[in-house]
Every structure is written in C-alpha cells, then in structure tokens.
Amino acid sequence: MCEASVYISKDGKEELILEEVDIIRPENGKFYLRSITGEQMQVEGEIKEISLLNHKIVLERKSPR
Amino acid sequence: MCEASVYISKDGKEELILEEVDIIRPENGKFYLRSITGEQMQVEGEIKEISLLNHKIVLERKSPR
C-alpha cells in the first residue's frame, strides 16, 4: 500500500500526527487529511517535504506574521 | 513502488508534468519535484489534492493577485 505518515515539524522535531494517510488537500486554510481507515483531521501548516518512497509527509506550521 | 504522477490543473483540465515522482518540496516559491529516475524540475503552483492510493498529486496555479 502506498499511504504515508504525516508529521508536523515543530522546533526541529517531527511529531507524527496521522498514519496511513491517503488523501491530503487544502481546506479552509488548513490541510484536510484522510487515512485509509477513514480517520479524518484538519491540520494547520504548509508542506515542508513529501518523500513518497519513504511514505512520509512533513508539514510545518507557518510562522505568525 | 509508491511514487506518484504530478499533474497541474489548468482550466479544469489536468496536465501531466512528471511521472514517478518521489520528492516534492517547496523551493524558491515553487515546488521542486524529483522522480525516481533522477529527473528534476521546479513548478509553480499550490497543492490542490494528493491521493496516494491513486499515485496522484495535483497542483494548481495560483491566481494572480
């Protein structure tokens, strides 16, 4: 299966927020995530890096402006 | 293998820009893409939708502001 784990990068560390993610799309200024098991969430942040062969997507919080 | 094809959405159509993409990351205000065969490019746009089980990533050009 080709789903990925989604992490949020904070203070130089990566925190796992959802595993086995299939769908990622922007929604209401956040990212909507849906896993293959049907778990859904919305996360604030921007794409930092996607590495599909590593099954890994890293988001990063925007700095306040 | 879990790489994906990257498309750009234009006028309601999706145009394939790079296949077998492994790495996607923001770089210089664009997205840097790298395929498993080593092909690299930079594309303007934002994430519209990622569907990993479909091996499909759709980018969308930002409207001029």
Image (cartoon, coloured by chain):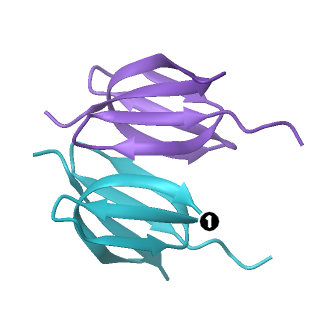
Chain colours: A purple, B cyan
Question: Which of the 4 image quadrants contains residue B38?
Answer: bottom left
Identify residue type, mark 1. Answer: Asn
Question: Which of the 4 image quadrants contains residue B56?
Answer: bottom left
Q: Position of residue A14 (x, y in %)?
A: 51, 21
Which residue ends up furthest to the left in the rendered image? B1
The residue indicated by pointer 1 is B28
What residue is drawn where x is 32% and y is 76%?
B17
Question: Which of the 4 image quadrants contains residue A8?
Answer: top right
Q: Is residue B10 left or right of residue A29?
A: left
Which residue ends up furthest to the bottom in the rendered image? B11
Q: Residues within 10 Å of mark 1 (few under 14, many from 20)?
A: few
Q: Position of residue A65 (x, y in %)?
A: 90, 43
Q: Identify the element where label 1 is drawn.
A: loop
Badge 1: chain ID? B
Q: Is residue A16 above or below residue A48?
A: above
In this orientation, which residue lies closer to the viewer: B55 or B11?
Answer: B55
Q: Position of residue B13 (x, y in %)?
A: 39, 79
In this orientation, which residue lies closer to the viewer: A37 or B2?
Answer: B2
What residue is drawn where x is 58% and y is 28%?
A42
Q: Is residue A54 left or right of residue A16?
A: left
Q: Is residue B50 above or below residue A54?
A: below
In this orientation, which residue lies closer to the viewer: A46 or B25?
Answer: B25
In what quadrant of the picture does the C terminus of chain B appear?
Answer: bottom right
* Tally of numbered discs: 1
Q: Position of residue A49 (x, y in %)?
A: 46, 44
Q: Is residue A57 left or right of residue A36?
A: right
What residue is drawn where x is 47% and y is 25%?
A7
Q: Is residue B43 above or below residue A55?
A: below
